[in-house]
Amino acid sequence: MNERTDQQLLRDYLQNRSETAFAELVRRHVDFVYSAALRLVGNPQSAEDVTQAVFVALAQNAARLADHPVLSGWLHCTTRNLAANTIRANVRRTAREQEAAAMNELLAAGSNAPWESLAPHLDAALGELAEVDRDALLLRYFERKSAREMAQILGTSEEAAQKRVTRAVERVREFFSKRGVTIGAAGLVVAISANAIQAAPVGLAATISASAILAGTVVHTSTAIAATKVIAMTTAQKTLFGLVVAAAVTTPLLTHLHAESRLHEQESVLRRGAETLARLQTDNNRLSHPAAASDNSAATSRQSNQFSEVLKLRGEITGLQSAVQELANSKTNGPLSREEKLASLRQLYADRVQWLKDLFAANPSQAVPELKYLSEDKWREEVEYDHHNIDPDNAYLLSGTRGMAQIDFAESTLGPALRKFLKQNQGQFPTDLSQLEPYFATPVDAATLEDWTILPMTSLQPGLRVDGDWAITQKAPVNAAFDERFVMGARGAHIGSRSPDNWVLVNNP
């Protein structure tokens, strides 16, 4: 029996909720995803977390990926995006400087670059490739596909598929060469083939299958899933752990937050109760010892009314004392219910989102017009990891949010308008962005459109280019060291890595 393709497995999972089909997808790709994550984050535990997040994303986006020709390409992009959230920027920068120094020493000694020198930068090199080249390289050396299998998957001839692989290898080799790592194409292929895929920890596939299927089931029963986007084109620093998925796991953070909330609530109730008790007891004493009245008849009537009020107040005191005692004796560290976890997460993320919005408001030079179009779900994605410890200046977080807003705007607004324009104009690319305005589903303000420009594809750095002669891209970065350049052509799009070089235009003759 022929092995089912990734697309067949995804359709089986979508149509029949087949856990077996999804488990097979995880088994088939878990080593590939884990290896990429491990290279990126450099820590086995963090790599496991990223790997689980990638497959959660796959379950949530299965409907959009059922016809995707090369699933490994999407998985790699998603792994890079999610891994970036876990990388400690300063630590990683220091590590890369140390690795560069070590490579220079090795090169000075005349030795070939070992795998340890290639691994930390391999995924960045893959990210610089055009999608068609990266897909071909992944199929050949990561998934071990033959030329015939590659041709069938890519819908091209064996010769064309092999040419793509050769071109991709050469571009990766050039990437390393620019960074002082000299290695031949043959040596690079051998190093990748021998080392790029490492076995994931035993049991990780089973754990992922269970959690990702749960996530997919929950998401698909929600009306909000219709608006879920494929995250392959979202920025780094994004996590796909949604509120419902995270709420299904009892974490020390949630327990602590909820316990603290309960304690605050108890303290408040006890304080109010004590104040009320003091007031009621004062009234009780006053009413129990009324002043002598000169008129016996009036005094008797007042005493009768006062006696009734005393009984009522004493009843209130007894009830309040019981309520306060019950609350004081409650177990603040007891297990949290699913509803309590969900409520705690919602409040935590809502507070973080508001903090991030306030941060942009206090630093308007760091904002971009596209932020106004960003949905609340997208804002929440940006804060689902606490960046305070790994991004003390918030530069990474601000850049990631800007990038998410710009890329989401490009994918949801510019992209559909461009496709309509191309169809109406026999494939002719627009010469000015104002030509797209009649094709926008909703109006776009001039300030946002001013943020983008049309450039010749050849004016962009080679690693940014996609098929076509022209590109739509951002005019300029807010922070060139952190911001990602998004490039959209007539037949594809690409997100560049974080590098100031990507914002430098090539001088054309």
Image (cartoon, grey):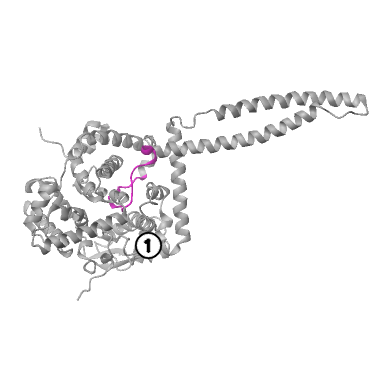
What residue occupies the far bottom of the structure in this picture?
Answer: 509
Nearest the viewer among 269 and 145 is 269
Q: Is residue 455 visible?
A: yes
Q: Position of residue 388 (x, y in %)?
A: 40, 52
Q: Quadrant of residue 391?
A: bottom left
Q: Residues within 10 Å of mark 1 (few under 14, many from 20)?
A: some
Element carrying mark 1: helix
Of helix, strand and loop, which mostly describes the magenta segment? loop
Q: Position of residue 258 (x, y in %)?
A: 47, 37
Q: Quadrant of residue 114?
A: bottom left
Q: Position of residue 370 (x, y in %)?
A: 40, 59
Nearest the viewer among 284 and 12 is 284
The stretch in magenta equals 227-246
Is residue 380 magenta-colored?
no
Residue 392 relative to residue 14: left or right: right
Residue indicated by mark 1: 437
